[in-house]
């Protein structure tokens, strides 16, 4: 302490020298910090009141509005999105019974295909009306159509075939307006696609009907096999799968997963086994089981790899030892997003193993569907199926008219 006076640091303690004030402060502190330790006069803890329950709403009552919620618009948008999403418990899931798939497709397959091909307005016909001077069809409009067709992988030769007849009709002044032009364009496209729109027909006399599935890596070959097995199983057919892709990592396991989903047996050997031996054993097993269809997977390969293409020929020869007519179908799976390269693949595979049918996949990506016209016009091979997504419901028979309408017309809700 300083001489001649009190220490300033102790001045604030003087009021505490009053016993009454000290007692009051102590009681106040106990009330603030130890309120849970208060007891009733009989020495027991006082009961804690339960929180009031919110009144129960009736089942059909509207939900209470969200107040002072910063993200309320985002929440409402997400709820609306979830409510309008394509939730198809039977058709959209792969782990359900195949028989339920065909009965509940919402929205329809080709409505979704139209939306995925165009992503809004039609890539082919969008804004054409603004190019018509005075509503007349002239060379400028046909040139614009030509540019769009070539950009969509239709190819020069096929584009010229489509537009050749249109130019002649324009010169004869037979196409008076945009509607007449679109009708003529639709007819020209159907002339190319209608002859190749031939669904796969399984011959019941063949026991089993053997389908050899080929294609390059990444085309969706194994997934297509799973979807096709799902579809055939839904038709009541007994299906067996052959895991002939013994080269790609996890290819056998992927096919086995599809087999479990579709409840069909999968004949497989270890990784690196001879694909021809696996396919031979699978055919023997399918015959012993009395199966209706055998679908054989093969290792993905580039159409430029001669040794691997020779391996495909070997698989075909080995199948012929058990059944001279096998394989009854050689199904080539093509990625629709690969453009003109898909056409080259089809030509090479057809030359090597005699392709009898095509599956166009991944039309839900950046592909605009033009390569379908190019392949149909060049090879004239039957297009059996198309795929627009990952689920079994995104796989269906190719319908030429529905496909052309999906290309020409904008998706629902798009600006005209």
Image (cartoon, rainbow, N blue to C red):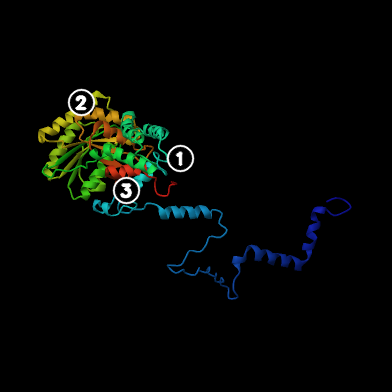
**Crowding at mark 1 (Cα within 10 Å: few <14, some 14-19, many 20+):** few
Looking at the image, residue 398 lies above or below residue 379: below
**Crowding at mark 2 (Cα within 10 Å: few <14, some 14-19, many 20+):** few
Of 7 and 273, which appears nearest the observer?
273
The x, y position of residue 65, in whole percent, is 52, 62
Whether residue 110 appears in this view of the structure is yes
Secondary structure of the residue carrying numbered label 2: helix
Query: Where, by quadrant of the figure, is residue 279 drawn?
Result: top left
Q: Which mark is residue 109?
A: 3
Secondary structure of the residue carrying numbered label 3: helix
Secondary structure of the residue carrying numbered label 1: helix
Looking at the image, residue 52 lies above or below residue 153: below
Indicate which label's residue lies in the foreground, 2 or 3: 3
- Residue that numbered label 1 is attached to: 134
Q: CA distance from mark 3 to mark 1?
A: 38 Å
The x, y position of residue 13, in whole percent, is 78, 59
Residue at 21% over, 32% down: 273
The earlier-in-sequence mark between 2 and 1 is 1
Residue at 24% over, 23% down: 306
The earlier-in-sequence mark between 2 and 3 is 3
């Amino acid at each position: 302490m300083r001489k001649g006076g009190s220490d300033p640091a102790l001045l604030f303690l003087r009021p505490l020298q009053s016993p009454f004030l000290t007692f009051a402060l102590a009681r106040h502190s106990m009330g603030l910090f130890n309120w849970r330790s208060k007891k009733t006069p009989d020495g027991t803890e006082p009961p804690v009141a339960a929180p009031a329950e919110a009144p129960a709403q009736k089942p059909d009552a509207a939900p209470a509005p969200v107040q002072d919620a910063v993200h309320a618009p985002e929440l409402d948008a997400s709820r609306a999105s979830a409510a309008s999403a394509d939730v198809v418990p039977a058709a959209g899931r792969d782990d359900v019974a195949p028989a339920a798939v065909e009965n509940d497709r919402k929205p329809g397959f080709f409505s979704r295909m139209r939306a995925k091909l165009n992503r809004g307005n039609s890539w082919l016909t969008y804004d054409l009306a603004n190019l018509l001077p005075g509503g007349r069809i002239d060379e400028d409009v046909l040139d614009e159509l030509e540019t769009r067709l070539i950009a969509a992988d239709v190819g020069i030769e096929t584009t010229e075939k489509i537009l050749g007849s249109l130019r002649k009709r324009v010169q004869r002044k037979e196409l008076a307006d945009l509607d007449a032009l679109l009708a003529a364009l639709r007819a020209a496209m159907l002339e190319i696609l209608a002859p190749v729109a031939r669904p796969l027909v399984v011959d019941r006399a063949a026991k089993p009907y053997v389908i050899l599935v080929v294609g390059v890596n990444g085309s969706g070959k194994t997934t297509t096999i799973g979807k096709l097995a799902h579809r055939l199983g839904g038709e009541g057919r007994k299906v067996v799968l052959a895991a002939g892709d013994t080269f790609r990592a996890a290819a056998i396991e992927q096919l086995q997963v599809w087999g479990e989903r579709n409840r069909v047996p999968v004949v497989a050997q270890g990784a690196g086994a001879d694909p021809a031996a696996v396919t031979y054993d699978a055919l023997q097993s399918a015959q012993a089981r009395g199966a209706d269809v055998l679908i054989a997977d093969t290792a993905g390969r580039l159409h430029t790899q001669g040794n691997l293409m020779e391996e495909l020929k070997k698989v075909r020869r080995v199948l012929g030892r058990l059944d001279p007519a096998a394989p009854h179908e050689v199904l080539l799976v093509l990625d629709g997003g690969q453009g003109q390269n898909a056409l080259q693949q089809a030509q090479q595979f057809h030359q090597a193993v005699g392709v009898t049918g095509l599956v166009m996949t991944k039309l839900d990506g950046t592909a605009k569907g033009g390569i379908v016209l190019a392949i149909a016009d060049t090879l004239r091979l039957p297009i059996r199926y198309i795929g627009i997504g990952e689920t079994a419901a995104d796989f269906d028979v190719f319908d030429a008219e529905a496909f052309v309408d999906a290309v020409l017309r904008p998706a629902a809700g798009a600006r005209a």
